[in-house]
Image: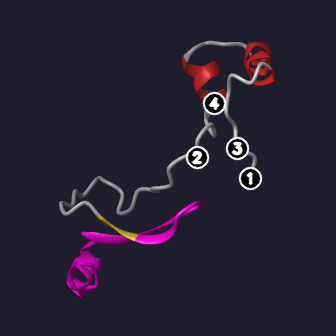
Amino acid sequence: MAETTQHPRLRERGTVRTINDPIVGEFDIPGMPLRFSRFPDDLPLTAPTLGQQNEEILTEYLKRSPEEVQELREAGVLFEKNS
C-alpha cells in the first residue's frame, strides 16, 4: 500500500493525492483516475465538521428563518463546534 501511494506516476496523474483535514491532518486518498478536458484538476476536499453548515442548510434548503435557527441553538437542538 505504501509503495502504491508513493508511486511518482500515480501522484503525477492525481490517482493518489494528499489532502489536509482540519481534524485528522494530512493523509493520502485515492484521486480520480480519469481526466476530462473541461473538469478542474483538483476539487477541494475538505469535509465540513459536524454542525458547521447548520445555518446554511436550515436557511437555504429548509427555508427556516435566522430567528428559528437561533431558537434551535438556544434549545440545544443544534450541535455546533466552535473552532
Circle 1 — which element?
loop
Instruction: Confirm or deny contact between disc 1 and disc 3 (CB under 8 A).
Output: yes
Label for residue 49?
A: 2
Type of amino acid at the residue the image marks with label 1: Ser
Residue that numbered label 4 is attached to: 54
Circle 3 — which element?
loop
Residue that numbered label 1 is attached to: 83
Q: Which residues are magenta?
A: 1-27
Circle 4 — which element?
helix
State the separation of the CA atoms marked 1 and 4: 15 Å
> Going by the picture, which residue comes out furthest to the left?
34
State the separation of the CA atoms marked 1 and 2: 10 Å
* Residue at image location 58% in from the left, 60% down from the top: 23
Q: Would residue 44 appear left or right of 74 to someone viewing this image? A: left
Residue that numbered label 3 is attached to: 81
* Residue at image location 64% in from the left, 20% down from the top: 59
- First in sequence, mark 1 or 2: give its number: 2
- First in sequence, mark 1 or 4: give its number: 4
Q: Would residue 49 appear left or right of 76 to someone viewing this image? A: left
